[in-house]
Image: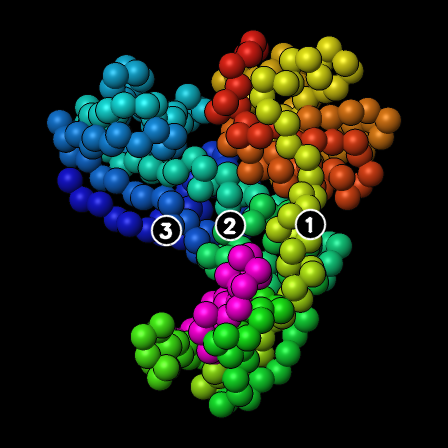
Amino acid sequence: MTNEPLISSEVFDYLRHLGIAPYTKLNDAAREQLGDGVRLIALFAGDSFITQKAGLRITTISGKVRLEPAGVLLDLPATREHTVLTQEGENRLRAEEDAVVVLADAEFLDMLSSWTELAAYASQSEGADLVKRLLSIRHALAFQRLPLEHVMQALKLMQPRQVKAGEVIVTQGERGDAFYLIWSGSAEIWKADIYDDEQKLVATLGPKDTFGDEALVVGGNRNATVKMIEDGELLVLGEQDFRNLMSQPLIEEVAPDTVPQMLENDWKTVDVRYAEEFEDGHIPGAIHLPLPELRARAGAALDKNGKYITVCLSGKRSAVAAFLLKQRGYNVVAMKNGMSDWEGETAC
């Protein structure tokens, strides 16, 4: 058995050619990020691949494999039945003949699809600069902790600041009043511990790294000094804007167990998953609007006087969908954690 950690351009294009979602909906920029949560696995006849991880999306590229204990036979990818999700407990993928499969973390694909759609929205409504910012900071840890709709707002609010080599941006002990993202250039972090007044170099930061959020979150003073070692540009988010984004949700989320009662009071669900996910099971009466098609079809499919609950697999795509619909004036909330936590009735 051989494992390749990344998806090549050829494999990505082949998945799109086969019409397999979500790969058909991802752009070329997203393809470059697939190595973070997607693996290509080659299995010789009789080999097995075992995983305890639930929510892995398995797609066959060639050959035949059987997923145990579910007992699902995956053949050449001609129909949606050849993509399945692993369940809780041990999952064994056994090759009945030489085979190649793609293993993808479903939540990772949710996140990537959501970022792709936000970038598409930004390109139409906000301009190329915001799109460039959005695609560039997907890996920034500070932004991974924020809901995606907050990321969009933060990037719109951040102001550029030109800086010079040797310039001290923040000083240890001073009050925190801003959050910073390094757009270009590099910086050093110097820090003195409680037993030593002399600062020591502890880390180096480069483009897309962030700093300054800890003091804002805890409401305290800076715990280190940050000094530029190259000329560059920072994106700066002021303290009040930072606090607003951290404390005030842009969309409302509702728990899955409250949805049945809401449906009895004229709310309608809008399922933004892909077709094969929707057909595998959805909330009865749900309106199906896949996230990549939402902006184009919402006007014809939804009533501005209606009340809507967006739904997806894990809650990520539905949060973005609610954000996009809210921007268009719809009364909308998102179902928290998506169908993963839904225990109510489903239809196929």
**Which color mode does the image show?**
rainbow
Would residue 89 be visible to someone looking at this image? yes
**Residue type at tag 3:** Gly
224 horizontally vs 164: left or right: left
Could you classify mark 1 by the number of other residues whose Cα lies within 10 Å: few (under 14), some (14-19), or many (20 or more)?
some
Q: Position of residue 174 (x, y in %)?
A: 55, 75
- The residue located at (25%, 19%) in the rendering is 68
In the picture, the disc for residue 145 is 2
Q: Residue at x 68, y 22 (%)?
A: 269
**Depth order, front residue of 13/188:** 188
Residue extent of the magenta highlight: 202-226
| Residue type at numbered disc 2 | Arg
Tell which tag, 1 or 2, sits nearer the viewer. Answer: 2
The amino acid marked with disc number 1 is Tyr
Question: Is residue 169 placed above or below 16 in the rendered structure?
Answer: below
Quadrant location, the C terminus: top right
Q: Is the residue 160 above or below the residue 137 in the image?
A: below
Gap in angstroms between the C-alphas marked 1 and 2: 21 Å
